[in-house]
Amino acid sequence: MKVLFATSEIAPWVKTGGLGDVAGALPGALRALGHDVRVLVPAYPALLESFPDAEEIARPHWLGGLLPTPGLREAVAPDGTPLLLLDYPPYFKRPGSPYLGPEGRDWLDNHLRFGLLARVAAWLGSEASTLAWTPDIIHCHDWQTGLAPAYLHYLPGQLAKSLFTVHNLAFQGLFDHASLFELGLPDASWHINGVEFYGYLSFLKAGLQLADAITTVSPTYSKEIQTDAEGMGMAGLLRHRAADLSGILNGIDTQVWNPATDPSLLHNYSARHLEHKALNKADLQRQLGLEQRPDLPLLAVVSRLTEQKGLDLLLDVAPQVLAMPAQIAVLGSGAARMEQAWRAMAHQYPTQCAVTIGFDEALAHRIEAAADIFVMPSRFEPCGLNQMYSLRYGTPPVVRATGGLADTVIDAADEKHGSGFVFGPATAEALLQALQRATSAWQDPKLWRRLQKHGMARDSSWEAAARHYAELYQSL
């Protein structure tokens, strides 16, 4: 199969969450199965710096509306995956986040920036393309590429089928009616069965309505988003398209996330040599200024600091957790109020709570290796990757029973397969009870070693997901 990935992020160059990781790893796993996968991504500064010799191979033109004529540059990722870099500096040569300006607000022209990405994806899958290579499937990811199925549907010359993957239904790409003309979409698309959503143009709705098939990043999340409670206003449409909707659980890059070879760790270890994990804990405690206490459980968070991630619940119970006694290490950024609250917690408990605002990839690896318990109390979690990193690093996670967390972590009550601690209601009380169970189990070395080994034995590679996607491509 010839597959075009259309994405607004790709690790390790541009990443704000799980989407970047998927776009960075899944194409390589599909190529290993023999498929011809190429990735279309905006030519952000980080990509142009990494591939300064990327040659222009096409200039898609006459794209409609106010969309400009960009360049398409070709590069090859270290794993051999061909990259098509969408080069239009006025849109993409900007500092910081792909989506936000320096003041932390959406760029005002995001509809044009990502409309161009979606339009060029559709151009590549149509008779208008000037490239010799034409995809069988255009695999679109999240709202930023949601218009690609719409362009394929409404404009002439479609050659490719489309698959739309929802990584997070909460982000919907909503813009006003005037955007329809600016994006070169016909008036007929402004319809309940088109791109219109309660008086707005929704990139996400366009993908859900018009793609040939839809996937989400875990089986449980695919069911949750069909309920009114979790459907973010799209539940009715998703129920209508239930026959075309499936959940395929994400994998992780098991070469990058491997405690036996991870270059970020001072002490590598494996399931056979878990005693070396304690050395990483001592190093992290020293680095973060925590009291060096091997007898205290170290709880960790690597996350966006938002209510979606349930980290307000952990804040509510943090004083009780620290009084157990225990330690907490937090790495992340997000809502200003939550960042400030976590900083205040660290200031109040300087030897027990360490908070690093921002993101540091190497530190994230060291935290996964050093922590005893990883905490993910998400209110909703389409897939989640950190719980899988934690399982692989012998760090049993405490998670809420939602989305991909429910699909990957088996509660310790299951003696044969248990790998972590799962709780139900999104309340501080339920989280505290789960943390108490986890810290109590940590005091039992035999039980704890069993949980660690179950988690480390789980196959979290991309191979299984790649096979599922390949079967879906073939069916389309």
Image: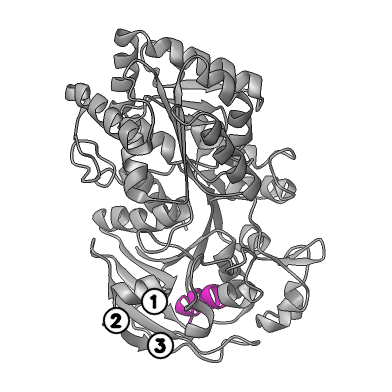
Q: Is residue 381 left or right of residue 238?
A: left
What residue did someone put label 2 on?
A: 54
Answer yes or no: do the residues labelled 1 and 3 have beta carbons within 8 Å? no
Q: Position of residue 284 (x, y in %)?
A: 32, 34
Q: Residue at x 42, y 39 (%)?
A: 386
Residue 193 versus residue 475: which sits nearer the camera?
A: 193
Front: mark 1 or 3 = 1
Magenta residues, as a range?
A: 116-126
Tag count? 3
Q: Residue at x 49, y 13 (%)?
A: 437
Q: Amino acid at mark 1?
A: Leu
- Could you tell me how far apart the alpha carbons at marks 1 and 3 are, in whole angstroms? 16 Å
Mark closer to the chain start, 2 or 1? 2
What residue did someone put label 3 on?
A: 130
Q: Position of residue 27 (x, y in %)?
A: 34, 58
Q: Residue at x 42, y 76 (%)?
A: 43
Q: Amino acid at mark 2?
A: Ala
SS assignment at label 1: strand
